[in-house]
Amino acid sequence: MSSQALFSSLVLIALLPLLSALVATVIPASHRWITPLASSLLLALASILSLLLSISQWNEPTLVWEKTWFTLGESTVTAGILLNNTTLVLLSVVTFISFMVHLFSIGYMAGDKGEQRYYSILGFFTFAMLGLVLADNLLLLFVFWELVGFSSYMLIGHWREKDAATAAAKKAFIINRIADLGFIIALLIIWGHTGSFSLTSFNFEEQEAWRTGAALCLLLAVMGKSAQLPFFNWLSSAMEGPTPVSALIHAATMVVAGVFLLIRVFPLFTPLALDVVVIIGSSTAVLGALAALHQFDFKKILAYSTISQLGLLVAAVGTGAYGVALLHLLTHAFFKAGLFLGAGAVIHSLHQAQHSSHVHFDVQDIRNLGGLRKEMPITFFCFSICAAALAGLPLFSGFQSKDAILVSVFSWSGDQVWRQAFAWTIVITSVLTIFYTVRMLWFVFFEEAKKTALLTIQEVPTIMRIPLVLLSLGSLWWMVAFHPLDFSGWLLDSIQPNQEHNLFITWLSLISIPTLTVLAFLWFKYRKKPTTLGFLQEGYYLDYLNSLLVTKPILAMSTVSERIDKKGLDGIIHGFAYLTVGLAHLLAWVDKNIVDGLVDASGRLAKGFGSIARSFSGGQIQSYIFWSVFALVISLFWFLFY
Amino acid sequence: MSLQSIYILSALLFSIGLVIVLVKRNAILVLMGIELMLNAANLNLIAFNKTVPASLDGQVFALFVMVIAVCETAVGLAIILQVYRHYHTSVPDEINELKG
């Protein structure tokens, strides 16, 4: 394929979701039934195009198209597209998952009054993420980064009449904005030292302090976007949005953007910065897994599971194995999208059932569910496959990618004790993952039906089953490699070849993971009573901590500054105003009495003279005589004495 | 009786006459003021004549003045009468058609 045709098709892929957004906006409300179909069709086209492109361009040399974007004084900023294997993987994943979500939404969002807005933002979200994936420089990437944040804000707050949804949307947006400060600082540092934003010009010879600084600032942005410690609480609140949106945010767009950025700027990271990355990632992983184990909200379990898995991804990048991170990103995208859509299917059919039988309870609370495997066999089957991939059972894609992560973490740790501690944190996370996955499956599908027994539940419609089946197929081992136990397949060999293998770890997990799964099943089957810790259920009281450490001081500060403003600044301004008014009064007085007074006085003078002169000819004979006599006397005196 | 006291008397008479002419509102009183002034002049004429005893010019002048004063008074009274008929007043201040 010629370079020009390649460029055009890349732009086309990015613009198709935008076109879908436009179409969803312009279709009149009377024909709104077209919207989901048209959007899904456009996304299907984008997905097929990117798959074909990925197959044809796989392992080709890196391609860059650049054009001058704008010039500032002497320096020129370029913008363009960077195409390599990483781009291709993300391109296919994003368009495919987005297509699946669109398909699923046809059923899930049917009859929603904001349906058109939903599809237009969904398309825009996909477009923003594709732009982010294709961008060849950090500034352009930052623009799309912000657009991704904006569209996730719109989607999380889709049901804007719900207070919780708008609050969650604001929370997601604000936390991301705070973290994005890091991105801006990093941009400034990088521009200051290299004079370029280009992602392809990252080849550094020496260890420089500024690189650590820039890398840590970028890490801050990633921590916000990918919900790492201490910014992860927005992700669990984001569950207020429609479930397909959660699938998109967790699998393919929003949170993946952070990890993608880490992979893109990997050459920038110094060993010191990478160590910080591992620490952040592994702590988030274990804390997320612990919290997931204590949630009762169906979607929040999945949310904390995403946080934990993202921690694994970040930790994998930190160990230097960015290819492994990309591999887990791919597998995670499939099984997490499958899990969320499965959860969405359960919620959707329960809502429908509630609607027809007029029994109402919280369908997202897993304590109310149970026994759904008989009523919803297909959903159960697909959900179990994705859950197995999440738990990391052999023959599923999760096994291979997690095996790769464990191997890379242990090869990174070597003999250093503190590093080994963090490596073991990852192992603990994997064990906890098995437990919370089994707990979720047990509560929702296996346990005897509780409140759901009152309902007549039906399987979801076919249009929602198709994405579930496709995504569960994508969660099988062949996504990674033909050998079900080997992680170095088509992807890893092309992104970061020659990954170390550790047969001990592979065999150990091959034996221990199924054993632990069975143990977990038995534990949940024979346990007495569900126990939970409020500390973990509330996500480490991070919200409370936020309000204590951030919101309250800021509120107090704003009260104080309001007072300063009112008393101090307003006082000064009022003082100035009074001074001005006083001065004006003074000037008015001067004007009235002195300036006007002079004019008046001259007038009065003239009038006085006039009246004197007039009095001589007043028509009064006696005054004529008086003046004549007066004049006579004067002249008499004159003649007599001079 | 010295001449000086006569001068003073005549000056007083003249002044009183003048003040009456200037101050009094009624035209008849004004006419009377004029008579006083004329008589003051007569007094002066006679007093000055005393310094030149050989001549009688002054005394003759005084006789003329008296005659003319009578005529004047007659004319004046006639005018006042006419004015009164015309304007129904004998106060000169109220007749101000010439006022500019």
Image (cartoon, coloured by chain):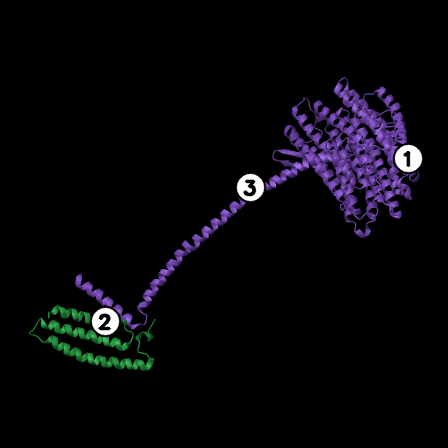
Whether the residues at callouts 2 and 3 have beta carbons within 8 Å, the answer is no
Tell me if I can see residue A116 in this picture.
yes
Q: Quadrant of residue A568?
A: top right
The image shows residue A30, relative to residue A96, as above or below, that is below
Find residue A348 and report its horizontal and vertical position in percent.
86, 43
Query: Drawn colour of chain A?
Result: purple
Tell me if I can see residue A458 in this picture.
no
Disc 2 packing (10 Å; few <14; some 14–19; many ≥20): many
Q: Which residue is mark 3?
A: A568
Question: As drawn, is A5 to the left or to the right of A452?
Answer: left
The image shows residue A258, relative to residue A568, as above or below, that is above
Q: Are marks 3 and 1 on the same chain?
A: yes
Residue, x 22% and y 71% (percent of image)? B16
Q: Nearer the viewer, residue A201 or A235?
A: A235
Which three-letter amino acid code belongs to the residue tagged 3?
Gly
> Which numbered dot is residue B18?
2
Q: Which residue is mark 1?
A: A446
Secondary element under disc 3, as helix, strand or loop, is helix
Q: Dot 1 falls on which chain?
A: A
Q: Dot 3 falls on which chain?
A: A
Find residue A411 and report its horizontal and vertical position in percent.
79, 20
Which three-letter amino acid code belongs to the residue tagged 1?
Phe
The quarter of the picture where the C terminus of chain A appears is bottom left
